[in-house]
Amino acid sequence: MSGSNPLTVPECPTIPSLLKEVRTGNMRAISRAISLLETNGPERKALLEGVEPFSGHAPIIGITGYPGAGKSTVIDQLITAYRSQGKKVGVLAVDISSSLTGGAILGDRIRMQHHSLDERVYIRSMGTRGHRGGLSMATRDAIHVLDAAGYDVVLVETIGMGQEEGEIARIAQTVVDVVAPGLGDDVQAMKAGILEVAHIVVVNKADHAGAHETLQSLREWVPEVLLATATTGEGIPSLVEAITRHQQSLEVEAPISG
Amino acid sequence: MTTATTPIRVLIGKVGLDGHDRGVKLVARALRDSGVEVIYTGLHQTPEQVVNIAIQEDVNAIGLSIHSGAHTSLFPRVLELLKTHHAEDIAVFGGGIIPSDDVGPLMETGVRALFPPGTSMSRIVEFVKGLPR
Ligand code: B12
Ligand SMILES: Nc1nc2c(ncn2[C@@H]2O[C@H](COP(=O)(O)OP(=O)(O)OP(=O)(O)O)[C@@H](O)[C@H]2O)c(=O)[nH]1
Ligand SMILES: [Mg+2]
């Protein structure tokens, strides 16, 4: 089975052979490439030059929102939705690294476990490794790798720290902000800098009290707000539609060439 | 070139059906506190899931916790799957309830280390830090 095995890669590949394997969608090669980009060593330039020409096709969807709001659970549901459309889905889930030790517990994928046996889903956890802005230094590079490897959509989960999260807006075309009920009053919603960059706000945990109130107060501030219960999948079809609408509105503004 | 500041990445999780997760959480935290990037999978993983995750996450090692008595089949299965994927370079180690009679045979199949109840976290951390990169 080795020839067709999507996970197989030679032990110590050269950059050109690694790139070739990445382009065929070989998961081990993709993983190695991302690790090399994360270490930011001398291979980075050649790797990026190798993937960038093949990248630029996949929609990049950023998922942000405060810790525990339900970002990973929403992503789990989005994976299911995109898989049912036959798409290959890439996920980059960023968690914060300890500033003291550099260590991290990367646990977002626990919420996405149904997909760990799906050959057409790739999930990668990344520590911030001291980078500020809600993502890791190599997140953008890793998106290029997944895009070049043929993933049809890339979902990026930020660390979820509010004001510090500007970077996702520069990397993703569509930013989804996941909030939980009880965010507070309008002023807090307005102050929560992250809403500025969000194209779509999801009031998650609609099974909890106060979800409708939160929805109402947010309606005044953001164009697209919807309710969801990520644990059951309720509201996810509307979210998928909202993302598609937003993507389409971008195409009208700036048609993707080629 | 891998710089000295690049953290070791280790998958930590429980395979099989038991829910004894105190030990594995202690290990995950101790490794985090020593500068390791821990990909924590939680409970009830199958060997197939563990190996797929290990490959997607490009980990240096897989640390498994087993208290169900199924260690004699689960560890060899993980090693076998790593071999099928040409990923034998990923080290496998673990802990939990592993009777001492089973330790030797498991080490022979390729498990690098097994840590019994009562092992200090510093020993486990030292082992992980000593793994080849
Ligand atoms: C606490 C406990 C429970 C708690 C678990 C709570 C929890 N969330 O963890 C509860 C009450 C739920 C429970 C239930 C059961 N338990 Co119980 N439980 C124990 C007990 C008393 C202590 C386990 C513990 O937490 N130890 C503390 C931690 C820190 O130690 P540890 O897990 O061993 O971890 C250390 C090492 O093993 C190692 N380690 C562990 N994991 C890993 C992973 C890595 C990567 C590394 C490097 C090291 C490592 O490092 C740790 C530090 O030293 C043990 C007896 C014992 N003395 O071990 C029985 C024991 C594990 N349980 C047992 C059994 C049978 C059960 C039940 C089936 C009982 C029943 N009939 O219902 C159920 C099963 C429940 C389930 N779903 O799995 C048996 C297992 C027998 C076997 N495998 O041969 C034991 C050994 C008791 C016995 N002597 O019979 N249990
Ligand atoms: N009741 C309820 N619980 C939910 C819902 N969505 C997520 N949760 C739970 O909320 C907790 C956090 O969910 P995650 O998806 O991990 O949230 P997150 O925003 O990714 O969290 P961090 O990555 O730690 O910031 C988990 O226990 C989920 O099961 C929901 O719609 N309803
Ligand atoms: Mg998360």
Image (tube, coloured by chain):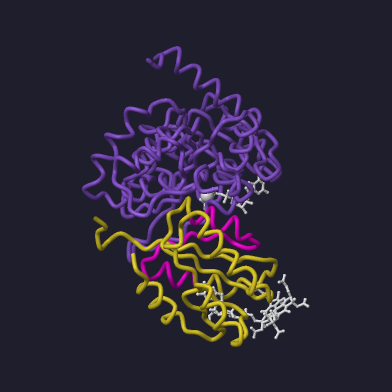
Which residue appears at 53% of the width and 73% of the height? B109
Question: Residue B126, located in which quarter of the rendered image?
Answer: bottom left
Quarter occupied by the N terminus of chain B: bottom left
Question: In the image, ligand 1 is in what quadrant?
Answer: bottom right
Q: Is residue B34 magenta?
A: yes
Which sits in the foreground, A2 or A17? A2
Which sits in the foreground, B131 or A216? B131
In the image: residue A209, left or right of residue A142: right
Question: Residue B19, located in which quarter of the rendered image?
Answer: bottom right
Q: Position of residue A207 (x, y in %)?
A: 71, 43
Chain B color in figure: yellow
Which sits in the foreground, A235 or A37? A37
Which residue extends farthest left? A42
Span of residues in magenta: B27-54
State which chain is coloured purple.
A
Residue A201 against residue B126 in the figure, above or below: above
Residue A36 against residue B16 in the figure, above or below: above
Which residue appears at 33% of the width and 53% of the height? A12
Quarter occupied by the C terminus of chain B: bottom left
In the image: residue A124, left or right of residue A71: left
Which residue appears at 59% of the width and 87% of the height? B100
Q: Position of residue A105 (x, y in %)?
A: 46, 61
Q: Position of residue B46 (x, y in %)?
A: 63, 59
Residue A36 against residue A221 in the figure, above or below: below
Which sits in the foreground, B97 or A160? B97
Q: Position of residue A222 (x, y in %)?
A: 51, 27
Question: Residue A166, located in which quarter of the rendered image?
Answer: top left
Q: Is residue A168 magenta?
A: no
